[in-house]
Amino acid sequence: MLSVAARTGRLGVIVLEGPDLIYWSTSAKGSKSADAAALVLRGWIAEFRPNVLISENPDAAGRKRGRQIPILKAFVDLGTELSLPHRVVERRRLFNNAHQEAAAFVRQFPDAAPTAHGKPPIWGKEPHNLVCFEALALARDAGCIEATEPDAPEDIPG
């Protein structure tokens, strides 16, 4: 299973074999345009030959703006073009922020710990690999992996 996500300035991919996370990566080049994103995704699909593709629904991508919407549409178009089983899911927000969600995924997938950096200071840049945890969230929302749950009341959106 291959799950792909888009955030400002970065694409992220995760590959799962059963419950095991076997690969995760990002691409800044793929976030430049819908065509660039499709090219990068095509490469990931050729390399891993997934039995299912997961991406976010571009029509229900509430917090996505700018280039991200055409990129999400390119993911859907490519899945259709390749006749690859494709789950287009609506992203659920179970945590206050992406950093809390990443911490929950690290508890579930300890191998991903080196990619989690915690929330940067307000003046700091977002970690480039945070998008990989968004790809994990899409796999969760598609029902392909066990649901992550907030640990503490402050993790739950109000």
Image: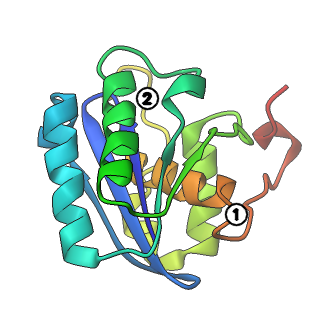
Residue at 65% x, 59% y is 140
Residue 121, compared with residue 84, is above or below; it is above
**Which class describes the residues within 10 Å of circle 2: few (<14), some (14-19), or many (20+)?**
few
Residue at 63% x, 73% y is 108
> In the image, is 29 to the left or to the right of 121?
left
The answer to whether the residues at label 1 and label 2 have Cβ atoms under 8 Å apart is no
Q: Quadrant of residue 51?
A: bottom left
Front: mark 1 or 2: 1
Dot 1: what SS? Answer: loop
Which disc number belongs to residue 121?
Answer: 2
| Residue 57 place in picture, x, y as percent | 54, 36
Residue at 23% x, 64% y is 44
Residue 84, compared with residue 78, is above or below; it is below
> In the image, is 98 to the left or to the right of 120?
right
| Residue 39 place in picture, x, y as percent | 14, 48
Dot 2: what SS? Answer: loop
Tell me if residue 28 can be seen. no
**Which class describes the residues within 10 Å of circle 1: few (<14), some (14-19), or many (20+)?**
few
> In the image, is 47 to the left or to the right of 87?
left
Q: Nearer the viewer, residue 110 or 141?
A: 141
Tell me if residue 11 can be seen. yes
The residue that disc 1 covers is 143
| Residue 49 place in picture, x, y as percent | 30, 76
Task: Indicate the quadrant containing the C terminus: top left, top right, bottom left or bottom right.
Answer: top right
Task: Find the distance from the CA under tag 1 to the CA under tag 2.
Answer: 33 Å
For this orientation, the residue located farthest to the top is: 66
